[in-house]
Amino acid sequence: MLRRRRAPLLLAAAAGAALAATSTASPSTDGLGAPSTLHGVARSSRAIYTIGFVVLDYKYSLRGLVPGSADYRGKLSEVHLRSAKKLLRLCEVNRGFYVKAGQFVSSLRQVPKEYISTLSCLQDQATPCKYQDIKIVIEQNFGKDLHDIFLEFDEHPIAAASIAQVHRGRLNNNQEVAVKVQYPGLERRMKLDIMTMSLLSKYVSLIFPDYRFEKILLEFERTMSMELDFTQEAKNSERTARCFRKNDVVKIPHVFWELTTKEVLTMEFCTGHKVDDLDFLRKADISPTKVAKALIELFGEMIFIHGFVHGDPHPGNILVSPRGQGRFSLVLLDHGIYKELDPKFRLDYCKLWKALISLDVPKILELGEQFGVGKYAKYFPLIFTGRTIYSKSALGTQVSGEEKTRIKQDLSSLGMDDISSFMESLPPDFLVILRTDGLLRSILGNLGAPRHVRLLAYAKCAIYGHEEQSRLESGAINRLSLRVKTSISYLHLRILIELARLLVQFNDYKHKIKDKLSWMLLKISRDVLGWYKPLM
């Protein structure tokens, strides 16, 4: 009874806090045309109303249904879809950080599929800011007239995102540049939006005590704070360039520090097309599978070896630039969101992938305890490799009908409380890994890359990443020994994956032969019947 009474009070508190926060803000415009005070109140009110509606929908639509039953699962899917559409509308109207939050949620493969499919359209949604507002931001940051800084500056943005937009320009020395400019008033708006989201998260946890999303919200707040500082983005960019200085496929735009501040980032202009633009790849005679392989190896090296991971690898941030004769460069953009992995976590994650490839069940469960997920560790193989922990199917192959049934039964017993408990128990580094891997798998799927491409790249990087620290700490002789050991270990896992791939191809070939023989027998039987018919 107390919980029921407190819920409306918390909603009132959220509204009051929102009003208090906005009333202290400047009455000037927010940079997008609306007075900041009224704009802030409206945004918070919409959020409170929407989340309240969603909570009530879950509470009363599922009342009286047995968790795990067919009726429960059917009704739950309906509520997921309704709620996702409500949240999509909220993000579209509130824009800014709400769009970023929607993008963040849609990239987590662990949330219900209804949310992923509905909110994924936010990845390409952005409304450009007026040129005059952008001009003011640039001139305020450098204390000069725009035309004293740039020889040319295109008023129309070449790209627009939820917190900034990019304009093409030319410096006085004729150097072509891309200028990323942050929308005015964002930092003030972020504080209010995060506060509103935090209060709503607490409200939801009061109604549904098993729903705990504090870690996800903290991770979102961390990434947004990083993304608002363009000097940090410039440092991330240069660090990544150093990591891949020997890789001639990876291109990181050069930063012009004299024209870079917290709100303006000026970098070398690079041409290219979105990484999953298949029409462009075909016209340029570039193999989509080779692009997929280069992409997953790039991020595999980031995750398993360098431990410094680009946190937003959606197609708009990765360009393919042709170099002739089927060759290409991968241009990596938008370095605002990065995560430096804890060294122990990186090594444990390397061990996890080695265990996943070889399906070493005791090791997977042991690492699950170290990651703090306990019983949920059994879902690691399903999340990362698409098979169950006790699977008998070969790695990279399609699971059997029997196994699919078992997976459905197992997953149907999971409620939203299990999903939130799993997400809440994960280390912060793991949330970044899951989000990044989810975005990469989506791109690989668009490129039509075989499943073994990702498995091979991760296996290779996991093995080399696992031995990296040992190589640094060993003498020359021991380093040579480790290099041989690493190569043998990788060869062993590669053989496992290649055998699985050959098995898949053999099964496909067997089915094609079977279908061909069935068709031939059917044709022969029809011909024979046709020959006998005149005699009957």
Image: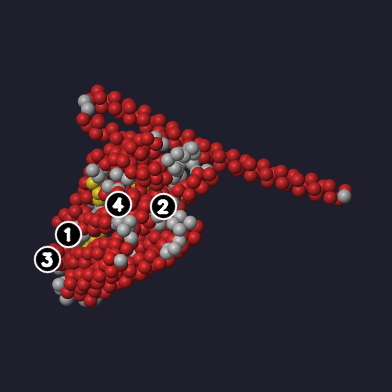
Mark 3 or mark 2, which is nearer to you? 2
Q: Give the alpha-carbon distance from disc 3 to disc 2, as whole Å.
A: 57 Å
> Pointers 4 and 2 in contact (CB under 8 A)?
no
- Residue 382 against residue 79 in the figure, above or below: above
Amino acid at the residue labelled 4: Glu
Residue occupied by mark 4:
424
Amino acid at the residue labelled 2: Leu
Residue 98 seen in the current view: no
- Which residue appears at 14% of the width and 56% of the height? 258
Residue occupied by mark 2:
414
* Mark toward the start of the polypeptide (3 vs 4): 3
Mark 2, Cα crowd under 10 Å, few <14 / some 14-19 / many 20+, is: few
Q: Give the alpha-carbon distance from disc 4 to disc 2, as whole Å.
A: 15 Å
> Pointers 4 and 1 in contact (CB under 8 A)?
no
* Mark toward the start of the polypeptide (3 vs 2): 3
441 with respect to 521 (left or right)? left
Quarter the N terminus occupies: bottom left
Mark 4 or mark 1, which is nearer to you? 4
Q: Give the alpha-carbon distance from disc 4 to disc 1, as whole Å.
A: 32 Å
Residue occupied by mark 3:
143
Amino acid at the residue labelled 1: Lys
On residue 262, the disc is 1
- Which residue appears at 38% of the width and 65% of the height? 59
Mark 1, Cα crowd under 10 Å, few <14 / some 14-19 / many 20+, is: some
The residue most toward the front is 1
Q: Give the alpha-carbon distance from disc 1 to disc 2, as whole Å.
A: 44 Å
